[in-house]
Image (cartoon, rainbow, N blue to C red):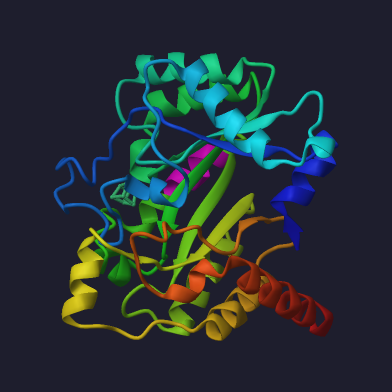
């Protein structure tokens, strides 16, 4: 298994930190364009709850400086490198949705900075048309661009249930177009979606494991039921069982063993906002989850 941190160290020779930025994009699944009212697990902050506060768009350089300071101040002074480089991470909402010219100028400004090593854009596969693909290709000629596609599940029945707003074939097609242009693609997967069995979740992993060319990276997280989402209302009316920490970590260890060795593991737990989290509460104990995962992954790897 390759973790993101090992992968980055092997390329850049130092730890590279992520800074969360806002492009000012909305999401077609929330603004009424698709008409589903948004993914049922999503709250008003878009998928960005899993990152930090949304910062104003006024000045992208100011956003970057503020986000850098947040990261740097958390590091012990003796390990702060002279020239720290960062991944500029646009996570909230759909960062390839909207006027291409506006987006191109923001992203070009970001990617040309010396302190930015990678531009990472979270988006939906139905929001990368030919114009956006050409924008991504041009940016990728300057520095690496990662495209993070929110798949969540490969099961179309679940996708309809969570109002994802596109069938899995759209993900597959977008993946192929991005890979034909040699762009790095990361898939975001959620375990524990309502109605999904262990086999359904592993089927999503197998779907991703057999993509050709191979998937570059994956983020896996447990479903967080957050206050303010449709799912929270559904859960309050009809609570459905959720996986325990033991069940989740077993499943992630098995998922990792199925994925190709070349697929970089970007994340195996989420960072849901504690103040909005309804269930499951164990996700907040990230240290324990990670320790359990490390043990189980080592065991599964030794066994295969
Ligand atoms: S695509 Fe992302 S931002 Fe849009 S509704 Fe779904 S989770 Fe929220």
Residue 240 location, quadrant: bottom left
Q: Which of 161 and 211 is in front in this view?
A: 161
The quadrant in which the C terminus is found is bottom right
Within the magenta stretch, is there residue 41?
A: no
What x and y, as percent, mark residue 103? Answer: 40, 21
Identity of the residue drawn at 78% across and 24% down: 83
Q: In this view, does 223 lie above or below 13?
A: below
Q: In this view, does 289 lie above or below 276?
A: below
Decide whether the magenta segment is chiefly helix, strand or loop.
Answer: helix
> How many numbered circles does the render carry?
0
What x and y, as percent, mark residue 180? Answer: 57, 37
Q: Along the horizontal axis of the image, is 137 left or right of 45?
A: right
Range covered by the magenta-colored residues = 172-179
Q: Nearer the viewer, residue 14 or 159?
A: 14
Identity of the residue drawn at 72% across and 56% down: 3
Q: In this view, does 164 lie above or below 116?
A: below
Identity of the residue drawn at 73% across and 72% down: 294
Residue 33 location, quadrant: top left
Identity of the residue drawn at 29% across and 57% down: 164
């Amino acid at each position: 298994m390759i973790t993101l941190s090992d992968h980055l160290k092997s390329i850049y020779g130092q730890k590279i930190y992520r800074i969360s930025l806002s492009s000012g994009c909305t999401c077609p699944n929330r603004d009424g364009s698709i008409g589903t009212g948004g993914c049922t697990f999503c709250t008003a902050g878009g998928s960005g709850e899993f990152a930090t506060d949304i910062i104003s768009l006024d000045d992208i350089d100011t956003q970057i400086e503020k986000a850098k300071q947040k990261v740097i101040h958390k590091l012990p002074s003796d390990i702060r490198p002279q020239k720290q480089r960062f991944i500029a991470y646009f996570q909230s909402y759909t960062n390839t949705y909207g006027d291409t010219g506006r987006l191109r100028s923001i992203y070009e400004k970001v990617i040309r900075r010396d302190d930015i090593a990678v531009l990472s854009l979270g988006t939906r596969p139905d929001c990368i048309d030919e114009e956006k693909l050409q924008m991504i290709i041009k940016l990728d000629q300057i520095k690496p661009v990662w495209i993070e596609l929110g798949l969540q599940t490969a099961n179309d029945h679940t996708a309809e249930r969570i109002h994802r707003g596109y069938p899995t074939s759209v993900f597959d097609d977008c993946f192929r177009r991005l890979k034909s242009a040699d762009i790095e693609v990361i898939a975001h997967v959620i375990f524990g979606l309502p109605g999904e069995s262990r086999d359904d979740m592993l089927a999503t992993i197998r779907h991703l494991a057999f993509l050709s060319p191979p998937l570059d990276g994956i983020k896996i997280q447990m479903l967080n039921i957050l206050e303010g989402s449709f799912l929270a209302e559904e859960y309050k009316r009809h609570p459905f069982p959720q996986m325990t920490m033991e069940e989740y970590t077993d499943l992630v260890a098995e998922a990792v063993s199925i994925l190709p060795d070349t697929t970089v593991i970007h994340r195996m737990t989420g960072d849901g906002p504690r103040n909005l989290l309804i269930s499951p509460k164990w996700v907040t104990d990230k240290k324990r989850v990670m320790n359990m995962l490390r043990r189980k992954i080592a065991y599964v790897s030794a066994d295969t």
